[in-house]
């Protein structure tokens, strides 16, 4: 089982009943100012296809993450402000508000500068990739992408952050 410590470095540990398979120590959440309690990594999964949401949410919960889901961009923004996820897995082609519009909205808010967003889409063109990265995605993945692969990308992204520190742009 992987957990994240204060430095967001994954380490293996045996699973305890009721424990999170993937947790991090956080003192900036307001939940535990001492930083001694672990809280699960929170992942927001945003996709208009319910089977896709369930597939990713099921796997992420299996490995111990806390998962919040949203069906479109409007729900995604509400969930970001309400749940404060650590990572957003964001489909780009959705009704009401596209993933690109969500990205632009998130990046305009200075409080969300460090929120990690992984764009995931069935569009495999270089233009789609460039557009998502320009809008502020940290990673661009194309579907189909297996849940364990996506989770590995999440871990790599958080490791990169731990190694380099907070974003400056």
Image: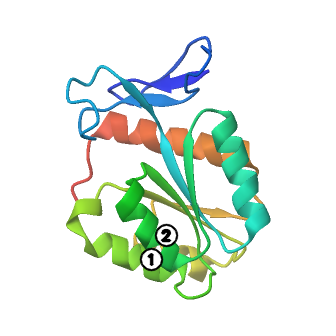
The quadrant in which the C terminus is found is bottom left
Q: Nearer the viewer, residue 140 or 95?
A: 95
Q: Pinpoint residue 98: horizontal percent, then vertical percent.
A: 54, 83
The label number, if any, that marks residue 102 in the structure image: 1
Q: Are marks 2 and 1 in contact (CB under 8 Å)?
A: yes
Q: Position of residue 68 (x, y in %)?
A: 55, 55
- Give the Cα separation between the discs numbered 2 and 1: 8 Å
Q: Residue at x 76, y 50 (%)?
A: 146
Quadrant of res 30: top left
> Image point 57% across, 73% down: which residue?
129
Residue placed under numbered mark 2 in the picture: 76
- What colour scheme governs how the chains and residues are painted in the rendered image of this protein? rainbow
Q: Secondary structure at mark 1?
A: helix
Viewer-nearest of labels 2 and 1? 2
The vertical placement of 93 against 161, above or below, is below
- 125 or 116, nearer to the observer: 116
Q: In front here: 25 or 104? A: 25
Secondary element under disc 2, as helix, strand or loop, is helix
Q: Is residue 168 left or right of residue 153?
A: left
Which numbered disc flags the more N-terminal residue, 2 or 1?
A: 2
Residue 118 in the image: above or below residue 94: above
Image spot of residue 41 (x, y percent): 48, 39
Instruction: Report the number of numbered marks.
Output: 2
């Amino acid at each position: 089982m992987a957990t994240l410590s204060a430095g967001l470095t994954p380490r293996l540990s045996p699973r305890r009943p009721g424990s999170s398979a993937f947790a991090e120590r956080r003192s900036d959440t307001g939940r535990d100012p001492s930083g001694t309690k672990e809280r699960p990594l929170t992942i927001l999964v945003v996709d208009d296809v319910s089977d896709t949401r369930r597939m990713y949410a099921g796997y992420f919960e299996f490995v111990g993450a806390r998962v919040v889901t949203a069906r479109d961009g409007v729900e995604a923004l509400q969930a970001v402000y309400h749940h404060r996820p650590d990572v957003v897995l964001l489909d780009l082609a959705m009704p009401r508000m596209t993933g690109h519009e969500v990205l632009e909205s998130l990046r305009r808010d200075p409080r969300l500068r460090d929120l990690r967003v992984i764009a995931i889409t069935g569009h495999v063109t270089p233009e789609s990739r460039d557009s998502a990265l320009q809008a502020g995605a940290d990673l661009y993945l194309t579907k189909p992408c297996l849940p364990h692969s996506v989770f590995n990308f999440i871990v790599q992204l958080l490791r990169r952050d731990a190694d380099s520190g907070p974003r400056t742009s």
